[in-house]
Image (tube, rainbow, N blue to C red):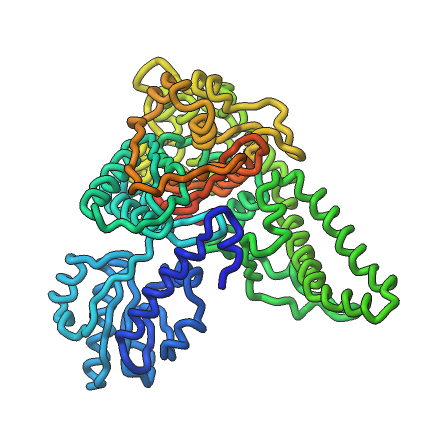
């Protein structure tokens, strides 16, 4: 049982249990011993739904990663392929099945598509001559995966690229389906607000699906009061900026994958006195990151500059608790102390881990390179010299810094200036292509198509107006005891979260002009609730809003929403959902052509 999923206002364990039940039902369809062949990308998301123990209970004896060639030997009756519906994976499956058939083994093959079956994939298997070998071809609808007590993600890594570059709306259909599943478990969401073209599409699909299922909806009291759908391209600036919360920096520097981070092992080696340190571990240290760990839940959303203080305060509390043992005189007191020991030891090891992580991050954040980069970002955000070639970017290109770093900065300058003058844009493009290689012309073209790096078409730059109206830049942001969401970027308040904040109070009507300057329509829809299901709100009870980011969300934005939920007078609790958890690097990478030739 993932207890941390049920801590929040909305019990997300219900969603996890529904997903586990479906998985059990499918596994029981394939009677006898089983081996699962995994599409590697799915192992992380599935790990959040079901551990190996659940699979084992249903006779799963072996697990392999999907690779071309022959399957490893396994003495099992069923072989089940768990795959995303991608054509290139079908060719590998066909190869696997052929190699098994040659050995005349009497095995049953099954295929489980996640999250949807695909006619094209089945056609490809037919062309390869293996479609008939499969006894079960099924789909496992894994849309929204609970990551934490207030966070859901579809982990659909190409959603932004598909929607804005390839004009492919598959991910929007999955989103609408995921929201329907959510409403089946948590009741109809009465109010829907949205901003952006993709948001409009998702809302339309949801309303249409609702009409199609009319009469079959469950009689559940609604848990959510409002759904807010936000397109990522309404706010292109936020993911480009360096996140400055503890969790955001862990993601920026090391990358958080499905709730885990891999860190350099040297920092975590337990050195004993007098022992040589030659036996250092070589495997990266893998840490789970979620609110099940008390200390992490406390510090994850703090600005990194406030983390040191929080850790030293915690250290004092823990050592004081251990000192208590000297005061335990009676048997009862000793027994009481011993019963608390496991919790205290867990707290001590958690503190040791996070102190090490904070030291690793501090080495980077105190470097000159980090400071220079941050200074330029903040100049762009405040509108300083955004219309001419930036000398810092020139220097970075000359030093051949990682290309993604350059692209993040150039895109940021373009977004804050509503496009770059043709002369400036051409200069950057030429420098990048000559330094990093001409194959990157495709990537530059992609960034232009999605609106991240574009020539200035009108002489009017709307960004300063948007910045002033929505107070996107706050001087002297209080990082230790924040009073505004701008602490997550040390001064910059994420545009996406400001829109969420204004919607709650005083409402979007107060910022009509700014909304018109941002891309895509804004709208409001109401869904009829079955009679008798209107919520009676208790005195002082908070409303609950589900904020769905189409195209990705950063950990800093999540921290800002959690901050709004905790504010005394906000009267609103936020649950966050997204197509993918992103940071500037992974986001730009998803738009690159041939990103594998790129060093991070």
Q: Is residue 539 left or right of residue 357?
A: left
Count of numbered circles on the image: 0
99 or 499, which is in the foreground?
Answer: 499
Residue 191, relative to residue 149: is it above or below? above
Pick out the residue farthest to the top. 459
Residue sitting at x 38%, y 20%: 509
Residue sitting at x 18%, y 46%: 212
Q: In which quarter of the image is residue 333?
A: bottom right
Residue 67 position within the rendered picture, expressed as x and y whole percent measured from the top left: 31, 69
Residue sitting at x 36%, y 60%: 18
Residue 197 position within the rendered picture, expressed as x and y whole percent measured from the top left: 27, 32
Residue 133, relative to residue 322: is it above or below? below
503 or 295, which is in the foreground?
Answer: 503
550 or 273, which is in the foreground?
Answer: 550
Q: Is residue 164 visible?
A: no
Q: In this view, does 28 lie to the left or right of 53?
A: left
Q: Quadrant of residue 191?
A: top left
Residue 166 position within the rendered picture, expressed as x and y whole percent measured from the top left: 24, 41
Q: In which quarter of the image is residue 503?
A: top left
Residue 207 position within the rendered picture, expressed as x and y whole percent measured from the top left: 24, 39
Pick out the residue farthest to the front. 532
Residue sitting at x 27%, y 49%: 217
Q: Is residue 247 visible?
A: yes
Q: In this view, does 400 lie to the left or right of 231?
A: right
Residue 269, relative to residue 523: is it above or below? below
Q: In this view, does 259 lie to the left or right of 526?
A: right
């Amino acid at each position: 049982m993932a207890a941390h999923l049920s801590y929040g206002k909305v019990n997300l364990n219900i969603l996890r249990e529904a997903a586990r039940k479906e998985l059990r039902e499918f596994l029981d369809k394939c009677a006898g011993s089983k081996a699962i062949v995994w599409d590697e990308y799915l192992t992380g998301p599935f790990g959040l739904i079901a551990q190996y123990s659940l699979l084992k209970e249903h006779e799963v004896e072996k697990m392999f990663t999907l690779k071309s060639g022959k399957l490893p030997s396994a003495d099992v009756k069923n072989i089940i392929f768990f795959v995303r519906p991608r054509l290139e994976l079908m060719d590998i499956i066909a190869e696997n099945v052929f190699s098994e058939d040659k050995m005349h083994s009497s095995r049953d093959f099954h295929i489980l598509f996640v999250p949807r079956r695909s006619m094209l994939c089945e056609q490809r298997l037919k062309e390869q001559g293996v479609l008939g070998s499969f006894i079960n071809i099924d789909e496992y609808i894994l849309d929204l995966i609970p990551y934490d007590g207030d966070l859901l993600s579809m982990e659909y890594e190409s959603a932004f690229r598909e929607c804005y570059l390839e004009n492919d709306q598959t991910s929007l259909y999955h989103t609408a389906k995921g929201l329907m599943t959510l409403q089946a478990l948590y009741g109809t969401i009465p109010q829907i607000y949205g901003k952006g073209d993709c948001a409009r599409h998702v809302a339309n699909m949801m309303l249409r699906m609702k009409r199609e299922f009319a009469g079959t909806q469950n009689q559940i009291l609604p848990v959510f009061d409002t759904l807010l759908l936000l397109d990522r391209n309404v706010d292109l600036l936020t993911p480009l900026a360096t996140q400055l919360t503890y969790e955001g920096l862990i993601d920026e520097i090391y990358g958080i994958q499905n709730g885990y981070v891999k860190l350099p092992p040297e920092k975590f080696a337990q050195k004993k006195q007098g022992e040589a340190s030659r036996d250092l571990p070589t495997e990266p240290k893998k840490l789970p990151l979620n609110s099940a760990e008390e200390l992490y839940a406390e510090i994850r959303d703090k600005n990194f500059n406030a983390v040191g203080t929080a850790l030293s305060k915690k250290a004092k509390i823990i050592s004081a608790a251990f000192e208590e043992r000297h005061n335990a005189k009676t048997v009862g007191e000793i027994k009481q102390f011993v019963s608390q020991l496991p919790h205290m030891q867990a707290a001590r090891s958690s503190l040791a881990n996070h102190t090490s992580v904070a030291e690793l991050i501090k080495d980077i954040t105190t470097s000159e390179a980090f400071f220079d980069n941050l200074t330029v970002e903040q100049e762009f955000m405040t509108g300083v010299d955004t219309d001419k070639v930036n000398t810092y970017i020139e220097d970075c290109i000359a030093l051949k810094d990682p290309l993604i770093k350059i692209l993040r900065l150039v895109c940021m300058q373009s977004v804050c200036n509503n496009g770059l003058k043709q002369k400036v844009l051409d200069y950057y493009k030429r420098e990048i292509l000559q330094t990093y290689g001409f194959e990157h012309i495709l990537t530059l073209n992609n960034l232009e198509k999605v609106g991240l790096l574009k020539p200035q078409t009108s002489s009017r730059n709307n960004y300063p107006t948007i910045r002033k109206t929505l107070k996107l830049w706050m001087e002297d942001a209080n990082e230790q005891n924040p009073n505004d969401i701008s602490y997550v970027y040390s001064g910059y308040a994420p545009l996406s979260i400001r829109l969420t904040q204004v919607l709650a109070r005083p409402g979007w009507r107060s910022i009509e002009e700014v909304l018109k300057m941002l891309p895509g329509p804004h709208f409001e829809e109401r869904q009829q609730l079955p009679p008798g299901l209107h919520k009676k709100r208790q005195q002082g009870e908070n409303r609950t809003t589900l904020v769905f980011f189409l195209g990705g969300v950063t950990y800093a934005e999540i921290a800002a929403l959690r901050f709004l939920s905790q504010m005394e007078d906000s009267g609103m609790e936020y649950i966050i959902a997204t197509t993918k958890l992103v940071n500037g690097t992974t986001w730009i990478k998803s738009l690159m052509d041939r990103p594998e030739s790129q060093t991070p």
